[in-house]
Image: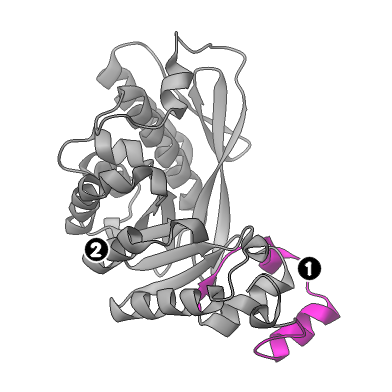
């Protein structure tokens, strides 16, 4: 189905569901955007690559872009509600609606370059999982099927932070619902959130992918950090998952990915033009970069 026709289909669907005349999706210059109050959201698709064969792309992570939409304004405290952390397992409908809107935008933008052997990684807001009481993924499954794909083409990605630690049992239940519907599952951590509860969540859920952000790793003062990362990768392998180093921006992080055994990588470092320095790095498992384990950060 042509992209414009899909845009009109989903506009018709939301107009009927909410009975408010809102048609949030629009196609501009070949890209789909969604309108939500005063903002217009779009997509950037970031490639995920094999660590030892970075020319091999296994999928894309959909990242949100936001620009101003001067036509509409938010009602009341809608934006405050959208951005606040949960105080109870339930949450407002605005989070669920915004999450569904952005994932539909990402799916539509992915379609022109989709391949059956690649995955689309879509972040889901933890408050969405906590706000939906049952049948997680059922609504979005209809969208995926309408776009000619299957749930197995989609990895539901969740950023796990300490702020949600007390909600882990509820999050686990929701994520298991996604798994039962055939979705892949990806958990993303930052190094500060790699605590016992998070590691137990990995063991219980057996996610397909576990990602660690490379941002700020060079600022961590922990002599055992490299060992902890290797331990994480071993845990991921033990549940038949694949480990992923995200947000790789420089040669140090790229070297860490190879040195500590990450299966996959993502980041702007791998999207830079190839230089002679890049080629030297690729020719050696640790490149020309000083090992993390010999630096003060580790």
Left or right, 176 with respect to 165, comes to left
Report x, y in % for residue 295: 71, 77
Dot 1 falls on a residue whose secondary structure is loop
Highlighted range, magenta: 262-289
Q: Residue furthest top?
A: 76
- Residue at the spot 70% in from the left edge and 66% down from the top edge: 269
Could you say which is closer to the camera, residue 204 or residue 148?
204
For marks 1 and 2, give the CA distance: 38 Å
Residue 199, picture quadrant: bottom left
Q: Secondary structure at mark 2?
A: helix
Q: Residue 117's image quarter?
A: bottom left
Colour approach in the figure:
one colour
Q: Position of residue 229 (x, y in %)?
A: 49, 74
Quadrant assignment, res 272: bottom right
Farthest residue to the right: give it: 276
N-terminal of the two: label 1 or label 2?
2
Residue at image location 22% in from the left, 47% down from the top: 174
Name the quarter where the N terminus is drawn.
top left
| 267 within the magenta span | yes
From the viewer's perspective, tell me whether residue 173 is left or right of residue 157: left
Q: Is residue 283 above or below residue 270?
A: below
Asked if the residues shown at circle 1 and circle 2 are in contact, with their CB atoms under 8 angstroms apart, the answer is no
Which residue lies at the image location 35% right of the left edge and 56% below the top edge? 154
Up/down of 74 relative to 99, above or below: above
The residue identified by callout 2 is 205
Locate residue 273 relative to residue 214 in the image: left or right. right
User: Which residue is denoted by mark 1 in the rendering?
Assistant: 273
> Can you give x and y, in whole percent of width and height, for residue 29 in the image?
63, 36
Q: Position of residue 248 (x, y in %)?
A: 64, 65
Is residue 85 covered in magenta? no
């Amino acid at each position: 189905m042509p992209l414009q026709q899909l845009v009109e289909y989903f506009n018709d669907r939301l107009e009927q569901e909410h009975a408010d005349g809102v048609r949030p999706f629009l196609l501009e210059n070949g890209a789909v955007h969604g309108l939500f109050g005063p903002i217009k959201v779009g997509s950037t698709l970031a490639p995920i690559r094999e660590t030892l064969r970075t020319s091999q792309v296994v999928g894309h992570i959909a990242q949100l872009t936001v620009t101003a939409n001067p036509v509409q304004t938010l009602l009341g405290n809608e934006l405050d509600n959208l951005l606040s952390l949960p105080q109870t397992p339930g949450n407002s409908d605005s989070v669920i609606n915004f999450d569904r809107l952005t994932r539909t935008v990402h799916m539509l933008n992915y379609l022109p370059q989709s391949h059956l052997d690649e995955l689309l990684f879509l972040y889901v807001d933890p408050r969405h999982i906590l706000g939906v009481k049952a049948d997680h993924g059922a609504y979005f499954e209809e969208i995926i099927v309408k776009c000619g794909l299957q749930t197995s083409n989609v990895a539901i990605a969740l950023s796990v932070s300490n702020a949600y630690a007390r909600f882990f049992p509820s999050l686990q239940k929701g994520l298991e619902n996604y798994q039962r519907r055939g979705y892949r599952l990806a958990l993303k951590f930052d190094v500060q959130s790699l605590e016992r509860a998070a590691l137990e969540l990995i063991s219980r859920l057996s996610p397909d992918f576990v990602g660690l952000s490379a941002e700020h790793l060079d600022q961590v003062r922990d002599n055992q950090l490299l060992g902890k990362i290797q331990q994480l990768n071993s845990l991921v392998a033990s549940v038949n998952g694949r480990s992923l180093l995200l947000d790789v921006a420089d040669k140090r992080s790229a070297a860490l990915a190879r040195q500590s055994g990450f299966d996959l990588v993502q980041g702007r470092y791998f999207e830079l033009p190839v230089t002679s320095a890049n080629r030297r790095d690729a020719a050696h498992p640790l490149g020309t970069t000083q090992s993390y384990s010999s630096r003060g950060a580790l």
